[in-house]
Amino acid sequence: MKKTLIIIAIIIVIAGSGIVWELTCNTKPVVVTNFEECVTAGNPVMESYPRQCRHSKETFTESVGNELEKMDFIRLANPRPNQVIQSPLTITGEARGTWFFEASFPVILTNWDGLIIAQGIAQAESDWMTTDFVPFKATLNFTVDKNAYSNKGALILRKDNPSGLPEHDDALEIPVVLQGVTDRI
């Protein structure tokens, strides 16, 4: 009886060791190279702006386009960076009067490949002949390719430049997510 208990104990120890080895040695390490992968891997997200995610000893920052660089010239209320958008898209915010020409400026929506899928005009909602911030609004209607390679896109708000001189060009560009596209990346 004593020998049987010892043999059973040895078998349990060997089996337990095998299970532990299988779980620890044969697991593939999670490869994280960007913010989205970090979040998908279940890592915590820091509620800073832009948001940050830490995996092991690396910190990944969410892309918000050039919004922080342009906030002294143009501010976007809707949509926000990385927001899921659908048609019709209403774009609102405020821009300095110098961003407009004749109370408007161009707005462009591109897909993951940079192909323009919609374009329109943002209109000032008050007097634009100022250097102060002026509210604006635009609406874009678009269709997405449901079989596209990626659901990523970009919303581009271009400073109107009637002179055509490159030194007067400027744009706010933020990443967006197109609803209805199954992301394959």
Image (cartoon, rainbow, N blue to C red):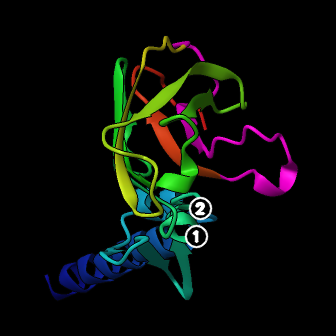
Q: Badges 1 and 2: C-beta atoms under 8 Å apart?
A: yes
Q: Which mark is residue 88?
A: none
Amino acid type of the residue tagged 1 in the rendering: Glu
Q: Does the magenta segment cover residue 20?
A: no
**Which SS class for mark 1?**
helix
**Which SS class for mark 2?**
loop
Residue at image position (25%, 76%) is: 8
Tell me residue 75's x, y (percent): 41, 57
**What span is in magenta?**
145-170
The quadrant in which residue 79 appears is top left
Residue at image position (57%, 35%) is: 153
Tell me residue 117's x, y (percent): 60, 18
The residue tagged 1 is 69
Q: Is residue 178 visible?
A: yes
Would you say the magenta stretch is mainly helix, strand or loop?
loop
Q: Which mark is residue 66?
A: 2
- Quarter occupied by the N terminus: bottom left
53 or 104: which is nearer to us? Answer: 104
The quadrant in which residue 52 appears is bottom left
- Label 1: few (<14), some or many (≥20) within 10 Å? few
Tell me residue 160's x, y (percent): 64, 41
Amino acid type of the residue tagged 2 in the rendering: Asn
